[in-house]
Amino acid sequence: MIMGHDHEHISPAADRRYLIAAMALLGVFLIGEVTVAILADSLALLADAGHMLTDVGAIAAALWAMRLAARPAHGQWTYGWKRAEILSAALNGITLLVFAAVVGVEAIRRLIDPPDAEGWPMFVVALVGCGVNILAAALMARANRTSLNVEGAYQHVLSDLYGFIGTLVAAIVILLTGWTRADPVASLVVVALMTYAGVCLLRDSGRILLEGAPAEVDVEDLRRHLLGVDHVVEVHDLHAWTVTSGLPAVSAHLTLLPECFLDGSAPKVLDRVQACLAGHFDVEHSTFQLEPETHLAHEPGMH
C-alpha cells in the first residue's frame, strides 16, 4: 500500500523557498572552505568542498526540475514535464557516484603515501561545516521529501554533513596523535556513504524511468483486489507505474459478466474498481477497459 505523508501538503512555493535558502547558505560557506582546504593541504576538506559544490548544483537542478514539472500538460506532453524531477534525481545519483569514485581513488593514494595535513584548520572548518550543513539539512527536511527530486538534493547535503563529521574526527585524531592517515580514512568513510546514497537514488529513479511498478505496490495483490470486485471475472493487460514521485498510475482490461453490459451496471463496477484502488493502494490515476468475455478472442497481444 502506498501511504500518505505529511510533507505532501507542503506547497511547491514553500519547497522552493527552503531549497533556495539552503543553496545560499552552502554557497557562502563553499568559498571559504576551498580557500582553507588549499592552504591546509587537506584532502578531506577539499573532498567536502567538492561535494558541497555538487550539493549547490544538486539543489539548483532540483529547483529547475520543480519549475519544469509545474508546467501544465500541453500538446505532445500529455503528462506535462513531471518526469523532469525524476531525471534530476537520477542526475543527483550519478554525480554522487562519480564524486565518490574520484575521492576514493585519491584517498587510497594518500593512504599509501600520506602528505602532511594541518589539524587545526581542518578542525575549525569541519566544526563550522557541521553547523552549516545541519542548518541546510534542517531547511531541506521541511520540504516535501516524498518528492524523489527533493530527496536527491537532500541526500547530497546529508552525505556532506557526514563528510564534515568524518573530517572533524580526523582532525581530532591528527591533533592528538599526529597520525595523518586519519584524513584519507575519513574520506573513505564518506565515499562509502556517498556510494550508498547514489545507488539508492539511481535504483528509485531507475524504477520510475523504466516504468516499473511502484515499490509499494504488489502487482499480484493488486490483481487479486481487482478480481475481488463483484462481476469482474478476469484481469489482463495490467500495468502499474509511476509518472513522478507521489503519482502512481494503473491501467488494465477487465472482463465483466455479460449481464453488466445488458442491464447498464458496468459503470457501477467501474466505480467500485476505482474506489478499491484509491482505498487499498492510494492510486487515483487509473484507466480501465471494460470487456465482455467474448472480446478476449480479439486480443492477440494480451499481456
Image (cartoon, rainbow, N blue to C red):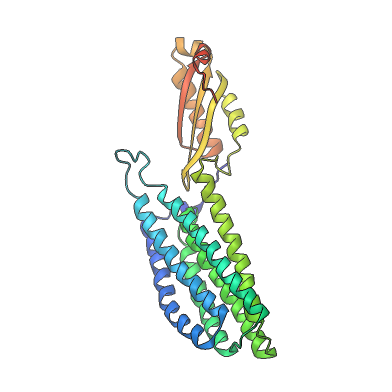
Quarter occupied by the N terminus = top right
Give above or below for 123 relative to 99. below
Is residue 135 among the parts visible in the rendering?
A: no
Q: Which residue is farthest left?
A: 75
* Image position, residue 57 (x, y; %): 42, 66
Quarter occupied by the C terminus = top right
* Image position, residue 72 (x, y; %): 32, 44
* Image position, residue 204 (x, y; %): 55, 50
- Residue 223 found in image quarter: top right
Front residue of 135/296: it is: 296
Is residue 272 among the parts visible in the rendering?
A: yes
Give above or below for 89 relative to 252. below
* Image position, residue 175 (x, y; %): 64, 90
Instruction: Give the total number of marks visible in the rendering.
Output: 0
Residue, x 58% and y 32% (percent of image)?
A: 222
Front residue of 117/287: it is: 117
Front residue of 16/201: it is: 201
Residue, x 38% and y 41% (percent of image)?
A: 79
> Going by the image, does 234 lie left or right of 147?
right
